[in-house]
Image: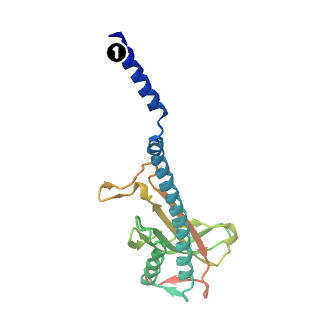
Amino acid sequence: MLPQALKRLGTLRLKAARFCKDRRGVAAVEFAFLAPILLMMYFLTMEASQAIETNKKVSRLGSMVADLVAQNPGSIDKAAIQSIMDIGQTTLLPYARSKPTITVTGLRVESSAPEATVVWSRKLNNGTFGPGLAKDDKLPIPPALAIEGTFLVKVDSNLTYEPLIVWVAGGEQLGLLNTFKTINMGETYLLRPRTVSQLTCSDC
């Protein structure tokens, strides 16, 4: 019995030694550990680049809308403002997981104080076009623009950015991570009318 037991023990020790020296599965084990980390880094890098690009587009949207409104010769109406806002939205494509909020406001500077009075205002919120800020409200403006008797076109462009990695569609969680919920992006532009001293809205 003893010789057989010793023989079996020797066999087990030999197999254990061979097992410890065997490196054929090391790469597969390492890949199994590293793959989730590498995938996470890839998707986070991709998401960060998309967020940066979308933030630039939100800024470009506000600049373009403000420029197009300010170019109108003397008067504008709700339909024209809505058309300009609709054009502005296209700058965000191909991003389409959420819609921007765009507010266009005509401001009259009545004194040298760093504030202006709302003359008219329109807003596009989640695809719905309607009234913006209340008439005669006071808004702060940069002191450098507080020149009595002048007129300003103010455009606020905002977007609640929804990262693809946590995007929910139809009640199903499509994201791979739940680290980020939303990222708020926004920009404000103040321009003077290009061809007139005051830009009116005929039906706002």
Q: Position of residue 94 (x, y in %)?
A: 44, 71
Q: Position of residue 61 (x, y in %)?
A: 52, 73
Identify which amino acid the numbered label 1 is placed on: Gln
Q: Is residue 10 visible?
A: yes
Crowd class of label 1 (few under 14; some 14 to 19; many from 20; radius 10 Å): few
Q: Quadrant of the N terminus?
A: top left
Q: How many marks?
A: 1
For residue 78, side relative to residue 48 (left or right): left
Q: Position of residue 163 (x, y in %)?
A: 45, 58
The residue shown at (70%, 70%) is 144
The residue shown at (35%, 10%) is 2
Q: Is residue 118 visible?
A: no
Residue under circle 1? 4
Asked where in the image residue 193 lies, by quadrant, the reply is bottom right
Is disc 1 placed on a helix, strand or loop?
helix
The residue shown at (44%, 41%) is 25
Q: Quadrant of the C terminus?
A: bottom left
Of 60 and 13, which appears nearest the observer? Answer: 13
Q: Position of residue 129 (x, y in %)?
A: 39, 74
Q: Identify whether 141 is placed above or below 152.
A: above
Asked where in the image residue 68 lies, by quadrant, the reply is bottom right
Q: Identify whether 201 is placed above or below 170.
A: below
Q: Identify whether 21 is placed above or below 198.
A: above
**Residue, far right:** 144
**Residue, far top:** 2
Of 39 and 179, which appears nearest the observer? Answer: 39
For residue 7, side relative to residue 187 (left or right): left
